Amino acid sequence: MTNRFRKDPDAKKDYHFDWTDWLVGSDTIADFEIFPSAELTVEDESEAGGIVTVWVSGGTEGAIHTVTCRITTAEGRIDDKTMYFEMKSE
């Protein structure tokens, strides 16, 4: 999975944190938290089958913003993944 994206500040799109290769055996995601840069808005978030989906809008032209996903698994593992958004009108 790539973790760098070009995003138009006016766009609202879904992005996916895929944890399926990281989960061990039958372990599952018990909880997740989403931490966006202050300039981004997470419109919605969900998890299914080891994939966390976030709908992202906003941002400042020319800036690089981030969204971090932190998961806790049923077996107690905790990890973060971060996406980087280069804000550029298309």
Image (cartoon, helix red, strand yellow):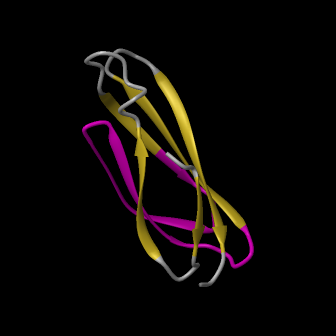
Q: Nearer the viewer, residue 5 or 32?
A: 5
On screen, residue 54 versus residue 86, left or right, reads left
Residue at the front extreme, as displayed: 1
Image coords of residue 89 (percent x, y) = 62, 84
Is residue 36 covered in magenta? yes
Total tally of numbered discs in the picture? 0
Q: Looking at the picture, does residue 79 appear above or below residue 51?
A: above
Q: Quadrant of the C terminus?
A: bottom right
Magenta-colored span: 34-63
Compared to residue 13, the image places residue 80 above or below, namely above
Residue at position x 29%, y 26% from top? 28
Q: Residue at x 31, y 36 (%)?
A: 50
Instruction: Say which quarter of the image contains residue 25.
Output: top left
Is residue 7 magenta-colored?
no
68 relative to 50 in the view: left or right: right
Return the x and y of residue 46 as percentages of the image width and height.
31, 50
Residue beneath the point at 43% across and 45% down: 17
Q: Is residue 23 left or right of residue 2?
A: left
Give above or below for 33 relative to 53: above
Give percent across and percent down for residue 33.
Answer: 45, 42
Q: Could you say which quadrant of the image residue 75 lies in?
A: top left
Q: Residue furthest right?
A: 62
> Is most of the magenta stretch helix, strand or loop?
strand
Residue at image x 71%, y 63%?
A: 64
